[in-house]
Amino acid sequence: MEVYEGKAKKMIPLDDGKYLMEFKDDATAFDGKKKAQFKGKGWLNAQISAKIFKLLEEHGIKTHFIGIAGDNKLIVEKLEMYPIEVVVRNIVAGSLKRKLPLKEGTELKEPIVELYYKSDELGDPMINYYHAKILGVSEEEIKEMEKIALKVNEVLREYFKEKGILLVDFKLEFGKNAKGEIVLADEISPDTCRFWDAETKKSLDKDVFRFDKGDLISAYEEIYRRIMD
Ligand code: 5GP
């Protein structure tokens, strides 16, 4: 069985239909054009993801999370992954500024859900239901992913609000399990979410690295500290 190595994680197959998901200290941005390593990032993202997956499971959302296996590794269910990224947005930031005439920080009246094709070669282009169908993903499956993504947003937005953090936007990935169910996969961490301090609006996520806004580890530690409280 193959080991899959991505930019920030390694997937190591176990012999019982499970995977070890190992979080690396590597950080990349802008389609891998910007690269660095941050000691401790893998550990922080593994712990933060585990905590969030547990919270979502408590709210009835199916995730691939099974358990923590040491410092920077999670045990997860083996899934057949969809080549789709589902992004949910609550506040204007990032690439949305290039799509709509809205200023950064504007609160959206309702969340926006977007679909992207996960492809380094093509630079993760935004797609719609028609494109997804050509990629082998039906409209019904997309609708189910969007429904789960909006439920995740409801749960996480409220949870982070209580911790003094604004959930600006985030990216989710899904897979299908042996029973044919659509299951939330990948990670949910400051690498995949935009988190702003509710008071200062300071970034506590990968934008710190993308735009040289300070010390990445301090920002991720701040998220860790607040969710472990
Ligand atoms: P944007 O489209 O504004 O660049 O990203 C929206 C949100 O999705 C941000 O929270 C961003 O971190 C996350 N996101 C989008 N694409 C990716 C991706 O390929 N990798 C990671 N780690 N996060 C992504």
Image (cartoon, rainbow, N blue to C red):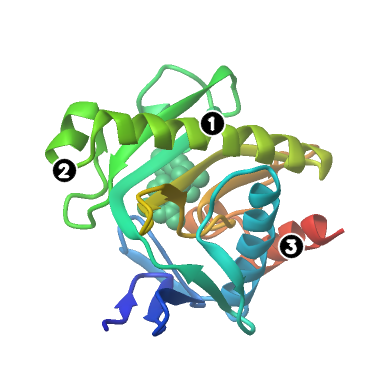
Query: Badge 2 is on which residue?
Result: 135
Query: Position of 202 compared to 192: left or right?
Result: right
Q: In which quarter of the view is residue 213 placed? A: bottom right
Nearer-the-camera pick, 190 or 105: 190
Q: CA distance from mark 2 to mark 1?
A: 23 Å
- Res. 224 mark: 3
The residue tagged with tag 1: helix, strand or loop? helix
Return the disc, 2 or 3, that comes first in the chain's sequence.
2
Nearer-the-camera pick, 194 or 87: 87
Q: In which quarter of the view is residue 152 placed? A: top right
Q: Amino acid at mark 3?
A: Tyr
* Mark 2 surroundings: few (<14), some (14-19) or many (≥20) residues within 10 A: few
Image quadrant occupied by the N terminus: bottom left
**Residue displayed at 45% across by 50% down:** 183
Is residue 129 visible to us here?
yes
**Residue displayed at 59% across by 81% down:** 39
Q: Amino acid at mark 1?
A: Leu
Return the disc, 2 or 1, that comes first in the chain's sequence.
2
Q: Residue furthest right?
A: 229
**Residue displayed at 74% across by 42% down:** 160
* Mark 1 surroundings: few (<14), some (14-19) or many (≥20) residues within 10 A: some
Q: CA distance from mark 2 to mark 3?
A: 36 Å
Q: CA distance from mark 3 to mark 1?
A: 23 Å
